[in-house]
Structure formats: structure tokens, C-alpha cells
């Protein structure tokens, strides 16, 4: 009993008023009942005090975390997004907290994080990936509940209430070579890609195997084309122009930049990252579509206070400005846009992510439509 008393008094940060109440209760009980029963009651009360003391200490620590001088000296992030070194370096310079980033591809993200988490060895404090990836991790108990003060200023649809915050859209557009495509020939609608003048002049990620391209094509069906027939006509017309297939979006700018191809289904961010390459985006009259990007804190993060500080910094106008200006990303911070001519005029829509079954189904369908003859 004395050990428990000493532990509670010396190791738990219990409020002095509660501790005084406990001592008074102890004296009162010792006067009224036998010591055996006293110890039993006191034991139960002491457990309550230990729980309350831990709760008070945790609550106090959480409330003080953003401005705490005891903040951890490092924070680790697993991210699928690329070219974010400027933000990592700026956070470290501004806060003194060493930030580390490990790049995980979307394909490896869930398996890597779950393996570490289930083994009790998840090294990441912060997780950044496509929304569906973080949704899976949330279902598996990997994502912590957290309300971000900065995140709460974002558009309502970006605030999910489950600790996951959307901060950008992996937007897709028609990118062309400005030295090879005359202004009058730049597509005004997605359907213009079916014009025979683009035969053998298009590059795109393989629609049978690239998940984001599959989702984008299905997004056109759900958000752009009025009927399924019009959508299928577009797909068949695009396939008839014999586009060049690459593994993902990353290789799409090179053949456009070199002049091997004139136009491609790619990402406007490359206009920034590939500058001064002669690239521009076709300002079609229809919405621009893309997959949402998200960020969250890992449950039981090794450095929880630093993780919160990092998420707040990441969602800030400063960091999102860097992501837009240096990387060309489309972010959700009001008034912040990448340095791409007229990009602020675009209507950008976040498309839903397809289930595994849908990806398999539509991938097989697109393989048939785009089969090389």
C-alpha cells in the first residue's frame, strides 16, 4: 500500500487539492472502520486518483502542445507526394524541430504502414497520401483523431471530422507543346482529342493499369459527359488516335517536351517543375478533375506534439504556397494557386476513388477499348 502511495505522490502529477482530499478521506476512514476495510476502500480511491491524475496530466500536455517548450526534437513523415523538400527544410528552420520524410509509393503505402503498425514499430508521426489510402489506414486504427485549427479553415468538404484533412487535388489536364501546337489547334473540350489530327501525337499513362488514369476516365463519365454513349464515343475516338502509353504520369512530359509527341493527358504541375520547357495546359471549357490528397497524424505517434505542429505548418498558407509555387500543386488554401497562367480560372473537381473491384473492372474494359491493333 505504501508503495502505491509513494508512486502516486511522487510519480503522478495529481492536483494538490485532490491529494489533500485523499489524505482527509484516509484519516476519516481510519477513525471509523477497521484498517482492513480502510485499505480496501483506499485502494479503490487510489486507483481513481491515478486515473484522474493521468487524465489531467495528459489533458494539460495536449493543451500546451502547440506552444510547449518540451516539444520533441524531431518528427517523421511517410508521404506519397514528391518534391516537398522545401517544406521539410522550412519547417525545421522555423521551428527547430528536425523533420524527416520517407517517400512511399501509393502501391506500397498501405502494406508498409500496416506491417510496421501491427508490429508496434511504426516510425512515422505524420502520414500523407491519397485520400483512399488514409481511409483504409483509418479503418485499421492507424490514424489518430485530431482537430486541426488551421485545417478547420479549409473548405467544408475537406474537413472530414476523423483526423484526416484534405489539402490538395492531384489534378489532371491536357498538356501540350507550345512550339508545336498552334493556339487555334489547342483543344477546347476533351472531345477534341478524338480529332484525327492528333493521331500518333498523344501520350498518356496506360489506361489498363494506371489507377489514377482509370479513375480519371471514369470521372469524366460521372462529371463531364452527359450520357454514357458520349463517354464511350470519346474513349473509342481517343483509342483510334493510337496514343503512346507510359507507366504513370511522371514520364508523360518528356515526349511532349522533346517534340516526340505534341500533347498528352498529364498534370499541370509539370509546367512548373519542367520549366522552361515549352509546356502549357489546354483550358478546356469542362471541369478539371483530380484525386484528393490528404494528411493525418498516426495513432500513438512517437512524437505527438511535433506531429501536431508539423500538420499545422503543412496546412498553413506558407507551406501550401511553397507547395503551389515550387511544386506546381493545386492546393485548397483559399487564394493560393500554382504559378501557371490562368489556372485560377479552372473549375477543379475532386473525383471519388474507385474500389479495387472497380479498378479491375474498368481496367479490363479500357484494355479492350485501347487494344493496339
Image (cartoon, helix red, strand yellow):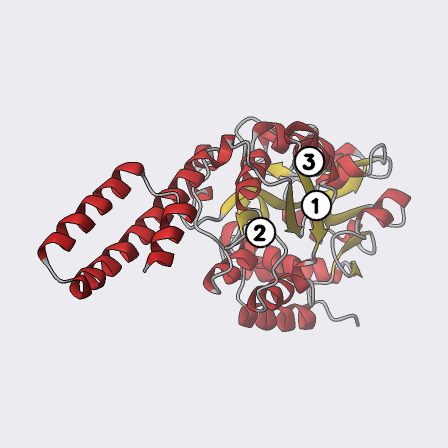
Q: CA distance from mark 3 to mark 2?
A: 21 Å
Lower sequence index among marks 3 and 2: 3
Disc 3 vs disc 2: Cβ atoms closer than 8 Å?
no
Residue 77 position, x and y percent, is 64, 48
Disc 2 vs disc 1: Cβ atoms closer than 8 Å?
no
Q: Secondary structure at mark 3?
A: helix
Residue 284 position, x and y percent, is 63, 39
- Residue 302 numbered mark, or none: 2
The residue at the far left in this view is: 32
Residue 191 position, x and y percent, is 64, 50
Q: Which residue is mark 3?
A: 87
Lower sequence index among marks 2 and 1: 1
Q: Mark 1 packing: few (<14 Cα in 10 Å), some, or many (20+)? A: some
Residue 367, above or below 95: below
- Residue 272 numbered mark, or none: none
Q: Which residue is mark 1?
A: 100
Q: Secondary structure at mark 1?
A: strand
Please state the total of marks drawn on the protein image: 3
Residue 134 position, x and y percent, is 54, 56
Which mark is nearer the camera, 2 or 1?
2
Quadrant in the picture for the N terminus: bottom left
Amino acid at each position: 500500500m505504501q508503495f502505491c502511495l509513494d508512486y502516486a505522490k511522487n510519480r503522478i502529477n495529481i492536483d494538490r487539492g485532490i491529494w489533500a482530499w485523499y489524505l482527509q478521506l484516509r484519516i476519516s476512514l481510519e477513525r471509523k472502520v477497521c484498517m482492513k476495510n480502510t485499505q480496501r476502500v483506499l485502494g479503490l480511491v487510489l486507483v481513481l486518483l491515478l486515473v484522474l491524475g493521468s487524465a489531467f496530466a495528459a489533458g494539460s500536455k495536449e493543451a500546451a502542445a502547440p506552444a510547449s517548450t518540451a516539444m520533441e526534437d524531431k518528427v517523421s513523415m511517410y508521404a506519397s507526394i514528391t518534391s516537398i523538400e522545401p517544406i521539410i527544410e522550412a519547417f525545421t528552420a522555423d521551428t527547430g524541430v528536425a523533420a524527416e520524410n520517407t517517400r512511399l509509393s501509393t502501391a506500397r503505402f498501405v502494406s508498409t504502414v500496416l506491417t510496421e503498425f501491427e508490429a508496434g514499430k511504426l516510425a512515422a508521426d505524420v502520414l500523407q497520401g491519397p485520400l483512399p489510402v488514409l481511409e483504409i489506414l483509418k479503418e485499421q486504427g492507424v490514424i489518430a483523431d485530431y482537430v486541426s485549427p488551421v485545417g478547420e479553415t479549409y473548405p467544408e468538404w475537406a474537413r472530414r471530422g476523423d483526423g484526416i484533412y484534405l489539402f490538395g487535388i492531384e489534378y489532371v489536364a491536357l498538356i501540350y507543346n507550345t512550339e508545336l501546337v498552334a493556339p487555334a489547334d489547342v483543344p477546347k473540350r476533351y472531345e477534341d482529342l478524338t480529332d484525327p489530327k492528333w493521331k500518333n501525337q498523344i501520350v498518356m499513362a496506360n489506361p489498363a493499369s494506371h489507377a489514377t488514369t482509370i479513375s480519371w476516365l471514369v470521372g469524366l463519365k460521372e462529371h463531364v459527359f452527359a450520357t454514357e454513349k458520349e463517354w464511350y464515343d470519346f474513349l473509342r475516338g481517343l483509342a483510334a488516335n493510337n496514343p503512346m502509353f507510359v507507366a504513370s504520369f511522371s514520364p508523360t512530359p518528356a515526349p511532349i517536351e522533346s517534340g516526340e509527341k505534341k500533347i498528352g493527358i498529364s498534370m499541370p504541375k509539370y509546367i512548373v517543375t519542367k520549366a522552361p520547357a515549352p509546356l502549357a495546359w489546354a483550358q478546356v471549357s469542362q471541369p478539371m478533375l483530380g484525386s484528393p490528397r490528404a494528411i493525418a497524424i498516426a495513432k500513438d505517434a512517437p512524437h505527438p506534439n511535433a506531429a501536431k505542429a508539423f500538420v499545422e505548418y503543412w496546412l498553413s498558407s506558407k507551406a501550401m504556397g511553397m507547395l503551389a509555387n515550387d511544386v506546381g500543386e493545386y492546393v485548397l488554401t483559399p487564394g493560393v494557386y500554382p504559378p501557371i497562367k490562368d489556372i485560377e480560372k479552372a473549375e477543379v473537381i475532386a473525383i471519388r476513388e474507385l474500389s479495387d473491384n472497380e479498378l479491375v473492372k474498368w481496367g479490363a474494359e479500357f484494355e479492350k477499348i485501347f487494344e493496339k491493333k
